[in-house]
Image (spheres, rainbow, N blue to C red):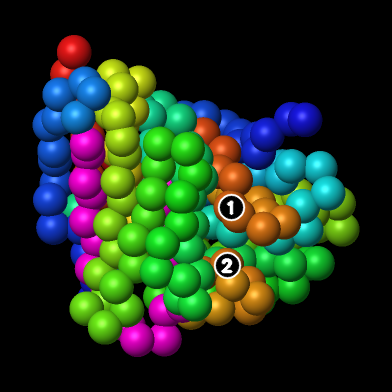
Amino acid sequence: KAGVTQTPRYLIKTRGQQVTLSCSPISGHRSVSWYQQTPGQGLQFLFEYFSETQRNKGNFPGRFSGRQFSNSRSEMNVSTLELGDSALYLCASSLTELSFGSGTRLTVV
Amino acid sequence: DQQVKQNSPSLSVQEGRISILNCDYTNSMFDYFLWYKKYPAEGPTFLISISSIKDKNEDGRFTVFLNKSAKHLSLHIVPSQPGDSAVYFCAATPNSNSGYALNFGKGTSLLVTP
C-alpha cells in the first residue's frame, strides 16, 4: 500500500511570494492533516480536513490555508511568505493513527 | 504555549539497556496520548498510544506508562537497540473521536550506542 505522498520535496521561495504544497493520502484515508515543523517550535498543527471540510484548525495566521478534494487529496497554500515560514511541512492521513509523509522542506529567502 | 513538554532534548543509552523517555502535559482535557519516532529525512512514524482509561500499554519492546494525576507519561524501550536511535515525539489530543489535532512535544533525540 502506498504511503502518504507529498510534493515537492524541496522548495525555495522569495519573501512575499505564495506557495502551494500537495499531499496524496493513503488510499481509503479520508482525514488529512498538516503540520509545520521548525527547530524552535517543534511540530505544530495547522489544520485537518475530512471529506472536503476543515474539521480542526490550529493557531496560524490566515496566510495559511488549505483544501481537500473529493478524492481526499489535499493542498495547503501559504501567501505572502515570510522568512519565518521556512520549515518542514508534513502532511498526515489517518483512519486511526496518523501516517505521515516525508514532508516538503520550504526555504524562504 | 507548549502544552506537551519533553524536557530532555537528548538521551544516550547503551545497547541492551533500558531507554526511558519522558513527557509532561498541562491540558487536563487531553485523553489520548501517542509516541512517534522520526528518522532524518523521513516523516514521523507511529509507535504506540495510550488512552486515559489505561495506565500502561505494551507493544513488544515498547511500553508507555501514563500517570494522569501527575500529567506525565513515559516511553520505555527494553532492550534498546542501535536502530532505535531517532527523535521521539510525544503527542496528545483531547479526544480521539473528534478528528486529529495533535499537540506535539519538541522531541527527544535518542542515541543507542553499541
Residue at mark 2: chain: B
Q: Is residue B111 magenta?
A: no
Q: Is residue B23 magenta?
A: yes
Instruction: Bin the neighbour count of mark 1 within 10 Å (Cα to Cα): few under 14, some 14-19, many 20 and up.
Output: many
Up the image or down, A105 lies above or below B73; here it is above
Instruction: Bin the neighbour count of mark 2 within 10 Å (Cα to Cα): few under 14, some 14-19, many 20 and up.
Output: many
Report the residue at 49% width, 77% height from top.
B53
Report the residue at 14% width, 46% height from top.
B9
Looking at the image, which residue sits at the far bottom? Answer: B28
Report the residue at 74% width, 30% height from top.
A2
Dot 1 amino acid type: Leu
Q: Are marks 1 and 2 on the same chain?
A: no
From the top left corner, tell me how far across and down residue A35 is, in percent: 47, 55
Q: Is residue A83 visible?
A: no
Residue B100: image tag = 2
Q: Would you say the residues marked 1 and 2 are in contact, meaning their CB atoms lie under 8 Å apart?
A: yes
The image quadrant of residue A34 is bottom right
Q: Is residue A33 visible?
A: yes
Report the residue at 57% width, 38% height from top.
A101
Q: Bounds of the magenta span?
A: B18-36
The image quadrant of residue B96 is bottom right
Looking at the image, which residue sits at the far right? Answer: A70
Cα–Cα gap, marks 1 and 2 = 8 Å
Task: Report the number of numbered marks.
Answer: 2
Which quadrant holds the C terminus of chain B?
A: top left
Q: Secondary structure at mark 1?
A: strand
Residue at mark 1: chain: A
From the top left corner, tell me how far across and down residue A60 is, in percent: 41, 71
Q: Secondary structure at mark 2?
A: loop
From the top left corner, tell me how far across and down residue B86 is, in percent: 31, 31
Instruction: Give the labeled residue for mark 1.
Output: A98
Up the image or down, A13 lies above or below B13; here it is below
